[in-house]
Image (spheres, grey):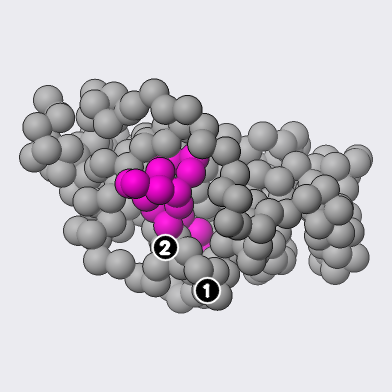
Amino acid sequence: MRTRRMTLTPEHVAQVHRVLDDPGPDPTWTYHGDTDYDALARDLIACRPDGPDTWLFAYGSLIWKPEIEHVETRRGTARGWHRSFCFRIERFRGTRELPGLMMSLDRGGQCQGVLFRLPPSDLAAQLGKLLRREITVKPPNNLPRWINVETDQGIVRPLAFVMNRRSRFYTGRLPPEQIADVLARACGHWGSCAEYLHRTVAHLEEQGIHDRNLWRLQALVAERIKADGCGT
């Protein structure tokens, strides 16, 4: 298989990186607490698809930072969903002064991603960990949902985190050039949006998944960084 060389390099990413302190929760927002997360986990288990296995569908950072145990990995395609930089963030990889953009699964199209099969033991704790990672404010940006994903071994119904279009942070579908402008500059205490994009594209390619939209976007972001006088 031919190896593609990304235009967006670690050197570009390093130029965007800034060391920032965590500003902490915004007091004007309402956040989920342990009681909320425990209830969500119980609800997910109660409506879990029939069968012995529990799967997670990863389409972005969960591919390269799953933070949960898994006993099997597969590639799969979720039809009716596509990965999209469609919600604004003011913490983690952005600030209130310079918000960033993050990916979620939005309606329409299709998305190739990675499936992780979770070990059967202590499912509630595993789901609780995922929920705390993916969901913070109320109403949430990401909604946990069991979806259909096609694999070479047949259809499975994994858990996926899909975009809540009622979230006040939902941006809708933005032009690639506008997304690139944001990703080339935004950074928070977790790192930059450019780093997030670089890691996601690189790990998708390692899995044999070539996302043409993200591939075009990484080239645009590299151009923006260079145009800003930060790239090399």
Residue 38 percent coordinates (x, y): 86, 53
CA neighbours of label 1 inside 10 A, class few (<14), some (14 to 19), many (20+):
some
**Whole-Å distance between the Cαs marked 2 and 1?**
9 Å
- The residue beneath circle 1 is 165
At horizontal 40% and vertical 48% (from top left) the residue drawn is 96
- The residue beneath circle 2 is 86
At horizontal 64% and vertical 52% (from top left) the residue drawn is 136
Q: Quadrant of residue 191?
A: top left
Q: Nearer the viewer, residue 218 or 131?
A: 131
User: Is the residue 117 above or below the residue 141 in the image?
Assistant: above
The stretch in magenta equals 88-105
Identify the mark nearer the N-term, 2 or 1: 2
In the picture, measured across the screen, residue 165 lies left or right of residue 231, that is right
Q: Quadrant of residue 198?
A: top left
Residue 125 percent coordinates (x, y): 85, 42
Kindly check if marks 2 and 1 are in contact, taking CB atoms under 8 A apart as contact: no
Disc 2 residue type (three-letter): Cys
Disc 1 residue type (three-letter): Arg
At horizontal 74% and vertical 34% (from top left) the residue drawn is 69
Which label number is shown at residue 47? none
Q: Quadrant of residue 10?
A: top left
Q: How many marks?
A: 2
Residue 201 can be seen in this image: no
At horizontal 24% and vertical 51% (from top left) the residue drawn is 180
> Of helix, strand and loop, which one carries label 2?
strand
Residue 15 can be seen in this image: yes
